């Protein structure tokens, strides 16, 4: 049971988040800000992780020398443009959204790869590449047979993103500004994100933020709680990240706490789907969706955010927005790489929104 979705033309239901609907004057639905990274993805077994002393499922920042050493030890890999917020913006574009992205690369080979890939999927990307300093960022993604990903990331020049790269005209012309927590470790980038959030809100845009990783939450817990209070309208997290933010073990307790700090919380729950909770008391629990194949979870949370953001900027109800996220994430995990290989707008048009049924896994 359910109804098909035609993104952007769905009639607004009673649960529409009206403040997030795109007005006619908006140039963009979403502007993303994040680390511009090229992912290097390889399939390995758990013995490889153990031999390298890697904790399964972890994301650790490394220096360029360590990234080079681990890359030399990896089996054959696939290189594909990534970066959390960049993946999300590519997903919104695949759903038919109007999008732009801000992220720093070098004038090197990987920088050219990143620039080409993101522009080729319809994203406006005009950030000027650096001509000196560290090379373009890369993330070594090790995928085990259980589809879990273990990541070692060299952030390179991406952390040099600064206020100068923030385009106030774009921020004044978007419905939502979306930023990733991964970029918060760099002081200049942190200042740039805060500036972008403040500029966007003055222009009447909404601000969305993803917690990105439990290790990020541990490093920035206190600061991020203040950020949610002051600047963030929509927060994205998985269960572990949200529980870490409030230092609790029960996700329901974490949900009760987070909604005091923001208007809308969107929480992914693996095979159980996701929960969207609004400050006005509305809640929907949305099932997961799968093509029947789970090969690589790299980027699944990023694409979930893409679906929800596209839903919010299309004026659909919360359940439909969450379902767009489920379908986008389900497509993502069906193949290697963090960006869609099927046009998501066509896919969601064929997959009905479930009314009341268990998750499809």
Image (cartoon, rainbow, N blue to C red):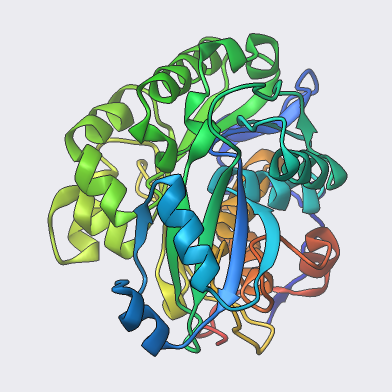
Image coords of residue 113 (percent x, y): 77, 46
Q: Residue at x 29, y 55 (%)?
A: 214
- The x and y percentages for residue 49 are 37, 79
Residue located at (50% from left, 73% from top)? 73
Can the viewer see residue 24 in this picture? yes
User: Position of 34 compared to 182: left or right?
Assistant: right
Residue 316 visible, this angle: no
Q: Quadrant of residue 57?
A: bottom left
**On screen, residue 331 above or below 201:** below
Q: Quadrant of the N terminus?
A: bottom right
Rendered location of residue 25, percent (x, y): 78, 18
Q: Quadrant of the C terminus?
A: bottom right
Which quarter of the picture shows residue 274? Answer: bottom left
The percent position of residue 95, horizontal first and vertical second, equals 77, 53
The image shows residue 20, relative to residue 201, as above or below, that is: below
Q: Residue at x 50, y 24 (%)?
A: 160
């Amino acid at each position: 049971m359910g109804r098909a979705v035609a993104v952007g033309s769905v009639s607004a239901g009673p649960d529409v988040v009206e403040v997030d609907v795109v007005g006619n004057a908006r140039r963009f639905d979403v502007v993303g800000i994040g680390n511009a990274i090229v992912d290097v993805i390889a399939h390995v077994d758990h013995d490889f992780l153990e031999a390298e002393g890697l904790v399964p499922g972890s994301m650790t920042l490394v220096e360029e020398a360590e990234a080079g050493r681990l890359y030399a030890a990896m089996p054959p890999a696939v290189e594909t443009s990534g970066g959390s917020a960049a993946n999300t913006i590519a997903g919104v574009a695949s759903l038919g959204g109007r999008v732009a992205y801000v992220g720093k690369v070098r004038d090197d080979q990987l920088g050219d790869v990143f620039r080409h890939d993101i522009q080729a999927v319809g994203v406006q990307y005009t950030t000027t590449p650096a001509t000196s300093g560290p090379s373009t960022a890369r993330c070594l993604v090790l995928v085990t047979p259980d589809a879990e990903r273990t990541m070692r990331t060299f952030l390179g020049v991406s952390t040099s993103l600064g206020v100068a790269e923030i385009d106030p005209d774009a921020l004044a012309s978007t419905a939502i500004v979306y930023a990733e927590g991964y970029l918060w470790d760099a002081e200049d980038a942190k200042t740039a994100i805060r500036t972008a959030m403040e500029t966007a809100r003055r222009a009447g845009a909404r601000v969305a933020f993803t917690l990105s990783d439990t290790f990020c939450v541990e490093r920035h817990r206190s600061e991020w709680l203040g950020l949610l209070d002051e600047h963030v309208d929509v927060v994205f997290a998985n269960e572990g990240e949200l529980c870490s933010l409030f230092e609790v073990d029960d996700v329901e307790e974490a949900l009760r706490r987070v909604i005091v700090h923001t208007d809308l919380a969107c929480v992914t729950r693996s095979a159980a789907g996701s929960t969207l909770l609004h400050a006005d008391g509305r809640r929907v629990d949305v099932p997961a969706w799968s093509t029947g194949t789970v090969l690589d979870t790299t980027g699944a949370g990023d694409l979930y955010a893409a679906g929800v953001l596209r839903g919010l900027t299309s004026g659909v109800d919360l359940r439909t927005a969450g379902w767009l996220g489920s379908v986008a994430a389900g497509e993502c995990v069906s193949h290697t790489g963090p960006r869609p290989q099927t046009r998501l707008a066509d896919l969601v048009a064929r997959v009905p929104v479930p009314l009341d049924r268990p998750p499809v896994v």
